[in-house]
Amino acid sequence: MTDADHQRDHVAASGAMESPENRAASIRWAAYALLITLAVGNVSGRILSVTNANIEAVEKIRVHQAIDRQRDRLEASGLKGDALQEQLTRYKGEVRSQLKLRRPFLSANDRSRWCTIRALVDDGTYAIDNIVCDPQEYPRWGTIDMVKHDRNGEPHLYSSKPTLLPTLLAGEYWLLQTCTGWTLSQQPFEVVRTMLLCTNVTSLVLMFVLLACVVEKYGRSDWGRMLVMATATLGTFLTTFAVTLNNHLIAAVCVMVALFAAAAIWYEGRRAWWWFALAGLFAALAVAIELPVVILLVFLGVALLCKVPRPTLAFGLPAVVLVVVAAAGTNYLAHRTVLPPYAYRAVGEDWQGGNWYTYSFQVGDVLKESYWNTGTTNLQARSAIDRGDPSIARYAFHCLIGHHGIFSLTPIWVLSVAGVLAMVTSRSAPSLRAAGWLIGIVSVLCFLFYLFQPPEMRNYGGMTSGLRWFFWLIPLWLLGMVPAGDWTAGNRKRRILAIILLAISALSASYPTWNPWTHPWLARLLDHLGWVQI
């Protein structure tokens, strides 16, 4: 026999020794790896092409117009031929620098955080005045998501976002700047794209891998497991928002880590100290990044405290305290208060009276007013969606099945509702009743929290392709989908239904080709038909 024959016999013997269960698991993991690879490649490619297309077009028009005017002036002065071209070439380089508008920032939301990151590393302060009040910088760096207040006797402008996340990312920017010499001022595209790849893409990979481990443990069918992974990688708004700096994606990943650790403690009997530390640390970190996650932190903490009180208090609680101290500490460094800027919005006529969102600021010779000023003129100048919905019933309708609806845009979550119901009625095996109650209660309370906000805050998250305030719940909903995925596996019609629901969800997630800070396709359709105004 030849060496090739021996090798084939060895492979065949190895395959015969491998159990059917192991072979099935190997195939599933190969499918998971392919789905994760597709999602990573998709998101990475979109990150590398991120720019504001509209501004790019305006910039080109401005440059061409300036060059045409300069050509007319030079020709009028008698310049011709090579001398004229040499002067125009030199002028073109100068004017492109002066009229630069392109930026790797896709909304006022992410620019607000980038301003803090730049100010911390480049200026050593949380104040962003030097950036947004500079007439040359304002066209690229201006943001409406900022506040004004007096610190040490002198008023300054600050990002309105919680401080812990941009502070942590400032460390990443400092390291990148130290290694490459790049700055957000001179090389914004290089810095932003590198940081998004390092932060958002790696976070997504972590979430996908942990989710794959969860579905392997608690799923019962190949089809159900792969349906959940396909939904996670291609059918939710987390990948949509991976091209921009935002808190929702990072908070969702933190929730996934906390759930993974909590499930290991609750269902697998893990009692090593690091499981409790992981659960507490990442649940608290998610709260510091996305405040309503406190609902999950409370219920998760109480559940673990009742089941295993000593290690929860000994290792989980200190991790929570660590994050609380860090969040409150960075907020105090920035604002001289442990409360976030959101707490200084309702009381007072202006920033001097305690309302940090009502102010004016100077950009060169131009006096600008805050977008959030509550005067009649300012309210009318806002987009229709930013004025808020005065009707709670209408708001609930559009949040669930309307133009920003959780179930109308991403109907795959209907299976999560069915899965959670199966969990709480113990119709899934192994029993996930505790997880089902946790997912259901936390989701409902989060919805009610946003439903009963003041009218101005009932704005669907503003200019956004999905109901972004609920994105942190996506890991919970994916876990809730596991029993329903197994249910659809046993019937061809159910599988077809699941495919249709996933296709619509993937369409909604893919609709914002390059900028997630746009209205959903359904909102645009209804606006076009004249049924709603956005």
Image (spheres, rainbow, N blue to C red):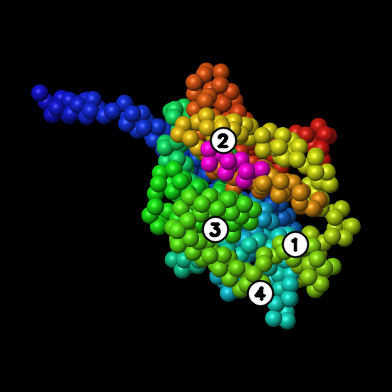
User: Of the residues under marks 4 and 1, which one precedes in the sequence?
Assistant: 1
Quadrant (top left/top right/bottom left/bottom right) for the C terminus: top right
Dots 4, 1 in contact, CB < 8 A:
no
481 to the left or right of 466: left
Residue at image point 66% right, 34% down: 407
Write down the residue under mark 1: 73
Which element carries disc 3, helix, strand or loop?
A: helix
* 338 sits to left or right of 255: right
Tell me if residue 149 comes above or below residue 194 in the rendering.
below
In terms of secondary structure, where does tag 1 sit?
Answer: helix
Residue depicted at x 58% and y 71% = 329
Q: CA distance from mark 2 to mark 1?
A: 78 Å
As drawn, 335 above or below 43: below
Residue denoted by label 2:
424
Q: In this rendering, which labeled residue sits more in front, label 4 or label 1?
A: 4
Q: Earlier in the sequence, mark 1 or mark 3?
A: 1
Residue 194 spot, x, y in % from top left: 50, 56
From which residue to which does the magenta span run? Answer: 433-444
